Image: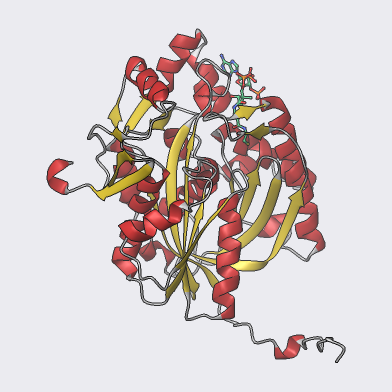
Amino acid sequence: MTGERPVPDPEESTLSTHPVGIHDLSVATGSHVIGLDEIAARHGVDPAKYHVGLGQDEMSVLAPDEDVVTLAAAAALPVVERHGTQGLRTLLFATESGIDQSKSAGVYVHRLLGLPATVRTVELKQACYSGTAALQMAAALVARDPAEKVLVVTSDVARYDLDSSGEPTQGAAAVAMLVTADPALLEIEPVTGVHTEDVMDFWRPNHRSTALVDGRASIDAYLRAVSGAWADYAERGGAPFEDIDAFAYHQPFTRMATKAHRHLAKVAGSGLDRDAVDAQIAATTTYNRRTGNSYTSSLYVGLAALLDSGELDPGSRVALVSYGSGAVCELFTGIVPEGYREATHPGATTAALDARTPISDTAYLELHAAHDVVVADLVTPHRTTGPFRYAGLDGHRRQYERNEPATR
Ligand code: COA
């Protein structure tokens, strides 16, 4: 016995030839919102710095009885209601706003959604990249067995220190994506470009509830990683730049997508003028300007905005550029199938954004401070308007419950 195995013949691959990708997608965000004019006034800066310089207008703020679990479950609920749980075998929860060092936040979501015990559940982390890792893993599972479905949920709340340069780039959102064979929204193409580099541009050590960031270094690291991922994508036989119709980027602030895309257009040798380059990302920034930074959700909030805009013709190719500080970047593409517009729900995200209650800077400061209180037992006030709520702590155990419509 040598233990050697025969090399598989690619001609006899057992992997499915069905296209695999995103069949349904849904976005959720917090119950509160603060306009960046309020933050600009406290920081003593021209509001145009945030609206134009960062490309951000508002940021979502979580109510005391909301967290990444309630957001994730709220995003996933309509997907589960539309498609049921038949064939669902895996729930992948991507976040960098973890609520526990051991237990996956996904297991709470599993219960809140009433998923069968036969759905495996795990949490993934690599800053803002982990949603893409989850999506690629989901695609691989479905390619192995096209009868299987995977629920990918990204959920994050971005928190920085008060009065820091990162404060106006906070926000929150969750995105749920059902990954299946023969998807209705996006067929993910197999070629991807990857770039990994150990860099300290943004991180959150275990003892901190707010992130640390070297903002300028992060912009440089992001651009370097985009170059690296594009080089790898091209080397592996990816589509030429001119065969890609739209680009969605990770957006810590929407202006970053503009910087990254202009950089990519230059690196890829595009002959397009600046307006044409900017037009290739314009539709992806509308929701992010309002949610604020949602870390690993932000790329998929951008994709939702692009698909909901309906401006892509069926057959169009979209590039997704995923960057997670630390740093990992992946660039991959997907084709928007015939009939995709019927599978979008264009009013849903706008309705969730419009439904948020505006809060004053004083109320926002109170919520920011309350997050850092560490106790074993806690009863949260009833504030969320979402379908699920975080009711507090009982002997260090997080309590989640359905938010009955009568009390919302
Ligand atoms: N009108 C219009 N634009 C203005 C302006 C005004 N009155 N005042 C400043 N600006 C522009 C600046 O020129 C700059 O644009 P540029 O980057 O194109 O040069 C932009 O606004 C930001 O100004 P800057 O002085 O660089 O801001 P800052 O030092 O306060 O920090 C960030 C900005 C983005 C670095 C900071 O908010 C940050 O680090 N955020 C966190 C980002 C993050 O999470 N990164 C990690 C994940 S990728």
Left or right? Give the position of 163 relative to 256: left
Give the percent coordinates (x, y) of residue 172.
Answer: 44, 37
**Res 206 quadrant in image:** top right
**Above or below, 368 relative to 335:** above
> Which residue of the protein is positioned furthest toward the left in this rendering?
406
**Above or below, 139 relative to 78:** below
Depth order, front residue of 204/3: 3
- Identified at 33% across, 64% down, the residue is 80
- Identified at 65% across, 58% down, the residue is 332
Q: Is there any visible trace of residue 384 in the rendered image?
A: yes
For the C terminus, the quadrant is: top left
Left or right? Give the position of 97 relative to 400: right
Depth order, front residue of 360/68: 68
Locate ligand 1 by image quadrant. Answer: top right
**Res 234 quadrant in image:** bottom right
Give the percent coordinates (x, y) of residue 333.
Answer: 63, 60
For the N terminus, the quadrant is: bottom right
